Image (spheres, rainbow, N blue to C red):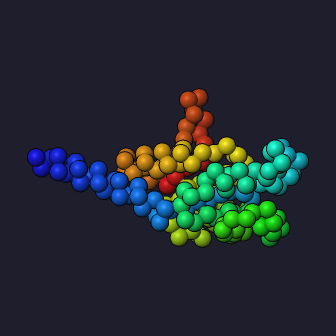
Amino acid sequence: MEGRRAEKRDTLEKLQALNNLRDASSLIILAGGSSRRLNNTFKPLFKLDGIPLIRYVVNSLDGLCDEMIICVKGKSQRDALRRVLEYRVTIVEDAISIQSPLVGLYTGLAHSRGKYAYIAPCDMPFLDKLVYERMWRILVEKGVEIIIPVWPNGFVEPLVCVG
């Protein structure tokens, strides 16, 4: 009997954790990377079917949590994004000038209010909110600190994660 109560209590706690998702997390979109394969075009503004990549990402992940932060390299990138985004997003400039996704991640986490963070790259227009929600559920159910997808061939997607 006590075992069932404990199991129900654990399940309720996990459901409560899932329900607190929006308040306890921030979405950090990394958008300051170099674009060598795109002739140095600012990737978030690269258009797919006439729409900048950043708008695909923002639209698809909107509503995942209350806070959305986009990390860029500098003022010119920040200003360029402000011209194309109609959303309530915070755009922050990298804390240091070293070119690395880790700098963007550090900057985003430093500016976030959430206890947890969803990390997304700016150049994956077909990201699905359901993938992040599933990663969140696994994080809560397994009691781990971070979830990073790994493809069947072993390729790791470090910039698509929850932790």
What residue is shown at x 59% (from left), y 29% (from top)?
Answer: 153
- Foreground residue, 40 or 102? 40
Residue drawn at 49 percent across, 62 percent down: 22
> Residue 30: which quarter of the image?
bottom right
- Residue under the image location 42 percent in, 45 percent down: 138
**Left or right: where 89 falls relative to 65:** right
Give the residue drawn at x 50%, y 49%.
Answer: 133
Depth check: give the residue in front, 17 or 153. 17
Q: Is residue 89 above or below residue 40?
A: below
The answer to whether one can see residue 162 in this image is yes
Q: Position of residue 111 (x, y in %)?
A: 60, 70
In this image, 38 relative to 56: left or right? right
Q: Hey, which residue is sitting farthest left in the picture? A: 1
Task: Farthest residue to the right: give it.
Answer: 39
Residue 156 x %, y %: 59, 39
User: Does residue 77 appear in the picture of this structure?
Assistant: no
Can you say whether 110 is above or below 38 in the image?
A: below
x, y (%) of residue 163? 49, 55
